[in-house]
Amino acid sequence: MLILASASLSRRQMLQNAGLDFTVETSGVDEDEVKLSLAAEKATPRDIAETLAELKAQRVSERNPGAMVIGADSTLACNGRLFDKPPTMAAARTQLQALGGQTHELHSSVVVARGGRRLWHSNEHARLTMRSLDDAFLDAYLARAGDAVLTSVGAYQLEGVGAHLFTKVEGDYFTILGLPLLPLLSFLAGHGIGLEKAA
């Protein structure tokens, strides 16, 4: 049994598109509280993503001892500042104004746990350079993207109209979408979970 410990639609879509048979169960981890605690300890963006991914996977795997549980998380850092999912459209606009014309780093971590114990993890990062954004462009982008911007750190989805925001992207596409998919698929295949099992 395979479980995704995430409410993320993009992560769910990636696993579905890869042909995996899985269920979804959210962890209930208070991500904001964990991030505040880790930030106070001067944890790196990568460490924050990995810790959250592990907590999610462990929490759900404790409730489902026989299952392989996938936890994932992403952090975005720009000029020494961490960005979260914007709570409102106004906050999304403010984030985009801060990121416009800058290069930011996106860290994505994935952890697989079973019986409350981490079996495996992978950390990947990407660098994305955003074009300079004027008010007219921001108005058009936010109107077209809609509430979807509230579901992603940085207020964009690269697989949609968010692609218009960027002049350069360095890194793995799946990592940018929030899940280092290729190393995950390799790990699962080594444990008999993959296309052969699905077929």
Image: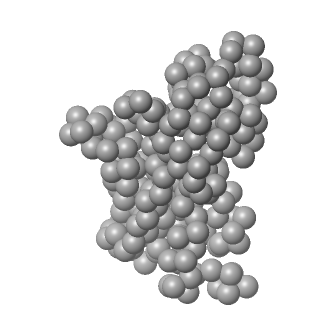
Q: Is residue 105 left or right of residue 65?
A: right
In the rendered view of the protein, which quadrant contains the N terminus?
bottom right
**Is residue 50 depicted above or below 64 in this figure?**
above
The picture places residue 12, in percent across and down from the top left corner, at: 63, 57
- In the displayed structure, 4 sits above or below 74; it is below
Q: Whole-percent x and y of residue 14? A: 66, 60
83 over 187 or under it: above or below: above
Q: Residue at x 47, y 57 (%)?
A: 124
Question: Residue 113 versus residue 50: which sits nearer the camera?
Answer: 50
- Assign the C terminus to one quadrant of the image: bottom right
The answer to whether residue 185 is seen in the rendering is yes
Residue 88 can be seen, yes or no? no
Extreme residue toward the top, this view = 135
Vertical arrangement, residue 192 with respect to residue 182, above or below: below
Q: Nearer the viewer, residue 6 or 38?
A: 38
Q: Position of residue 125 (x, y in %)?
A: 48, 52
Which of the two residues, 168 or 60, is positioned nearer the viewer here? Answer: 168
The image shows residue 105 at horizontal and vertical percentages of 48, 42
At a point 72% along the width and 39% down the height, the residue shown is 163
Query: Which residue occupies 74% across, 30% down?
Result: 145
Image quarter of residue 143: top right
